[in-house]
Amino acid sequence: MSVSLITGATAGIGHEYAVQLAARGDDLVLVARDSARLEEVAEELRRAHQVRVEVLVADLTDREQLATVEARLADHDRPVDLLVNNAGFGLKKRFLDNTADDETAMLEVLVTAVLRLSHAALGAMAERGHGGIINVSSVAAFLPRGTYSASKAWVNSFSEWAHLEYKSRGVKVMALCPGFTKTEFHQRMEVKRGEGFMWLEADFLVRKSLEDFEKGRAYSIPGAQYKTIRVLTTAIPNRVLRLTQSMGRR
């Protein structure tokens, strides 16, 4: 029986990972800040899929709470087979309109937590000779869109390196780069969620990412429209791409 640990597991992409991984029979470790919502989601998944679901309440900006998740990943007696680093949030305002504390909190979740949780998981997985990590990044990583994009560019670079570094030791690492997805992400930013062909359904996104992961790919970019954008970013100068930074913030 495989065990998957998912951060940010109570909503959006993280919740969809929990649903799809439970449906295939994985036991779960769910991580989020909201204890009541965690327990509610856990009980729903237990009833629907007859899997074991463990909950860890943790704010990933708090180093002590983050350490409890690291310890769970490093536990040799209760191995985790798949880590999904999904937790994250965005800031609606531009860099100088945010406080340095707000920017640092985002960096802690998008970069520091990914680094520390990956370090804990990779150590245990490489020693066992099997395991995997999916780091939820963003198509924004390929665009000059402030600190969110910069953080996701780090996730991409780190994931691609780890994919190459640990493949020979039986560990798969992949970066998932979603485009606009119909989740609570934009609502939490107090930004209107859009409609139309640029907006992906979370179930499609996660399903395609798991297919790409099983194929051993370093990147998953679901949706032909976003694969096209990725190609275009290699040809269009950054001074032009910078004009996209207001998209998804209104």
Image (spheres, rainbow, N blue to C red):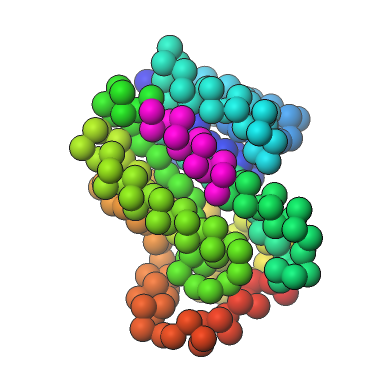
Q: In this rendering, does residue 200 appear at all?
A: no
Part of the protein shown in magenta = 111-123
Image spot of residue 219 (x, y percent): 35, 56
> What residue lies at 30% left-to-right and 22% top-to-bottom?
128
Position of 166 compared to 209: left or right?
A: left
- Please identify the residue farthest to the front as the structure is shown: 100
- Please identify the residue farthest to the top as the structure is shown: 77
Position of 215 compared to 192: left or right?
A: left
Position of 23 compared to 46: left or right?
A: left
Which image quadrant: the N terminus? top left
> What residue lies at 67% left-to-right and 29% top-to-bottom?
65
> What residue lies at 41% left-to-right and 85% top-to-bottom?
236
Q: Is residue 228 magenta?
A: no
> What residue lies at 50% left-to-right and 31% top-to-bottom?
5
Q: In this rendering, does residue 114 appear at all?
A: yes
Image spot of residue 182 (x, y percent): 60, 60
**Figure check: 94 above or below 35:** below
**Figure check: 1 above or below 66:** above
Which image quadrant: the C terminus? bottom right
Tally of numbered discs = 0
Position of 35 compared to 49: left or right?
A: right
Image spot of residue 17 (x, y percent): 50, 42
Q: Nearer the viewer, residue 151 or 192?
A: 151
Image spot of residue 70 (x, y percent): 53, 28
Magenta portion: prevailing SS class: helix
- Please identify the residue farthest to the left as the structure is shown: 168
Q: Nearer the viewer, residue 30 or 98?
A: 98
Residue 237, image quadrant? bottom left
Q: Is residue 113 magenta?
A: yes
